[in-house]
């Protein structure tokens, strides 16, 4: 599995953009970058994924560098309910590749009033 | 929206009891999974299933069994619960090239 590196924690003011970085320097050409988050006591929630182009959905934007060695998840207007642990995972496309799906330590995002 | 529903959020069981954890997904996904999540150990795969009546062992199947009689339902069974099975259990299914998780079931074995 390609390894990812994330800062252990970040703070963000409510209403401001939260930018969560992830390094994945050993990513291979067929691997996607996935982002999940886990709010305390709940199951992980899918946020977004991408291959090389930037992606946006109703929850967040994903910016992937041109060399694909790093990416940034952007929550455009963070709210207190966005306080969670955010996980960056790289995974080859294909549903059978989820039989081994490992979360690292992630980034604990603290959104403050 | 994809929905993976776990029947019980919080359970307390006694050592030696048989425990059933039920999971249902509503998106006609073929692949379903059971994980447990423990502090410092991350997600660990217990069993998964590619189709009805098919099952494959994951990384930590000992002490567990599963049942997939219908496509939408995947059950995890603890034949004789032990205290080291106290954990949060997560069911998941895959579709559209990603994996979707349920809300989790917190099991305490006393």
Image (cartoon, coloured by chain):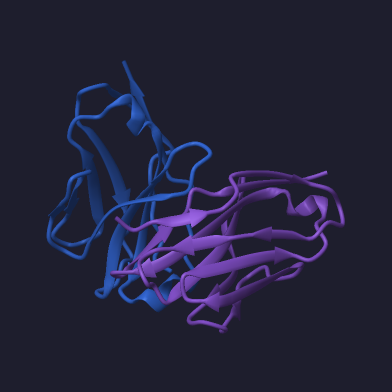
Chain colours: A blue, B purple
Q: List x then y, in percent, for residue B13.
A: 78, 48
- How many marks overall? 0
Front in this rendered view, residue A78 or A4 = A78
In the image, taking residue A90 as reference, residue B81 lies left or right, namely right
Residue B20 image-quadrant placement: bottom right
Report the residue that reaches farthest toward the right: B16
Residue A99: x and y in percent read: 49, 72
In this rendering, does residue B42 appear at all? Answer: no
Q: What residue is shown at x 87% (from left), y 57% (from top)?
A: B16
Position of the N terminus of chain A by quadrant = bottom left
**Residue located at (24% from left, 45% from top):** A73
B54 sits to left or right of B85:
left
| Position above or below: A110 against A41 | above
**Residue in the picture at 53% in, 39% down:** A41
From the top left corner, tell me how far across and down residue B101 is, in percent: 44, 56
Placement of the C terminus of chain A among the 4 image quadrants: top left
Residue B71 in percent (x, y) is at 47, 76
Which residue lies at the image location 35% right of the left edge and 67% below the top edge?
B27
Q: Quadrant of residue A12?
A: top left
* Residue extending furthest toward the front: B70
């Amino acid at each position: 599995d390609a390894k990812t590196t994330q800062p252990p924690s970040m703070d963000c003011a409510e209403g401001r953009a939260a930018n969560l970085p992830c390094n994945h320097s050993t990513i291979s050409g067929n691997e996607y970058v996935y982002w999940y988050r886990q709010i305390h006591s709940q199951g992980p929630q899918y946020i977004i994924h991408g291959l090389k182009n930037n992606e946006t959905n109703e929850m967040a934007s994903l910016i992937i560098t041109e060399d694909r060695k790093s990416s940034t998840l952007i929550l455009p207007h963070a709210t207190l309910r966005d306080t969670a642990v955010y996980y960056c995972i790289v995974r080859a496309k294909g549903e059978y590749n989820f039989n081994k799906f490992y979360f690292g330590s992630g980034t604990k995002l603290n959104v403050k009033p | 929206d994809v929905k993976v529903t776990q029947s019980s959020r919080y359970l307390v069981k006694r050592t030696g009891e048989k425990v059933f954890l039920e999971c249902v997904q509503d998106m006609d996904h073929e692949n379903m999974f059971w994980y447990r999540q423990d502090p410092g150990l991350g997600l660990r795969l217990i069993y998964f299933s590619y189709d009805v009546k098919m099952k494959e062992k994951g990384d930590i199947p000992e002490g567990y069994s599963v049942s997939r009689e219908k496509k939408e339902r995947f059950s995890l069974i603890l034949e004789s619960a032990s205290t080291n099975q106290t954990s949060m259990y997560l069911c998941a299914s895959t579709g559209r090239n990603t994996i979707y998780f349920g809300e989790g079931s917190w099991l305490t074995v006393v």
